Amino acid sequence: MKDNGDYQPYSYFQLMEVSLRELLVEKGVVTEAQVEAAVEDIRSRTPERGAKVVARAWVDGSFKQKLLENGSRACEELGLDMPALRLVVMENTSSVHNMVVCTLCSCYPRMLLGLPPEWYKSRNYRSRAVREPRAVLSEFGLQLSMETKIRVHDSTADMRYLVLPMRPAGTGGWSEERLASIVTRDCMIGVAVPKPN
Amino acid sequence: MIAARFKPGEKVRVRKAYPLGHIRTPYYIRGHGGVIERLCGSFGNPEELAQMRSGEPKQPLYRVRFLQNEVWPEYRGNPEDALEVEIFQHWLE
């Protein structure tokens, strides 16, 4: 019978990570506590941050304007710390749908969405999103009409992209919190659209 | 810092070159023509930074918009479907 216990030998890259980390601690470059704090910081970032930004843009026109002009500065206004992140926010409209990919690696607005999902880093998504976006979107369950123009954004350098989805009909009078609850990670990557529930 | 040579709306072409090293210009877009969507600012040259050099002088970085059906001849969709890619100035002509 196959052993399903927890123990697995380190992979090549895990071993590299442990060796490098131990060496850095040993040489006094970083402390264990600093490494732990950095990992916790990464874990604390979730797509809820991005959803908060989107919900604010839906209810506050002047914030939305600022967000589209300078994404990083607008997020800082909301108290979100955006070090070294140049955020470009792309607005979905009734005639334009935006989606984000990084064909070269896995560039992603981590400050707002946390760690990217596995599929975002897959060769399949990275190579096909730029070439047959409509087929890729339909695999995510999103069928766009031929009238809608698709813009695919390849994050190849220093910018990071967030899609501002359209506020769905039937959400008039909703609180900002309730609006944020329907803004999923995939809506902000542009492979889904928010649905009122 | 190197001055920006292109303006939004201007037509450009990506150099069709295949140097070795850490290149942030994807293969699929080399040789294709597009239009400057915006200037993003100036950033350290990644080809230099990857060699542990300073990356100076900083290179202007643009977002360039390409039409899908010009990049992929077999593309089927709205004729205005587009692809936007960040390209450093030294890759544009």
Image (tube, coloured by chain):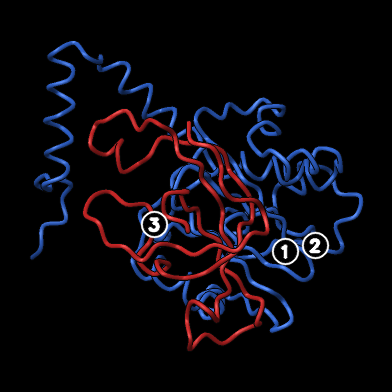
Chain colours: A blue, B red
Numbered label attached to residue A195: 1
Q: In front: mark 3 or mark 2?
A: 3
Secondary structure of residue under mark 1 = loop
Numbered label attached to residue B25: 3
Q: Please name the amino acid that badge 1 sits on.
A: Lys
* Left or right: residue A5 compared with residue A47: left
Q: Please name the amino acid that badge 3 sits on.
A: Thr
**In this rendering, is residue B17 above or below A65?**
below
Residue occupying the point 87% across, 62% down: A170
* Left or right: residue B42 compared with residue A77: left
The earlier-in-sequence mark between 2 and 1 is 2
Q: Are marks 2 and 1 in contact (CB under 8 Å)?
A: yes
State the residue position of label 2: A168
Secondary structure of residue under mark 2 = loop
Residues A126 and B52: in front is: B52
Q: Please name the amino acid that badge 2 sits on.
A: Pro
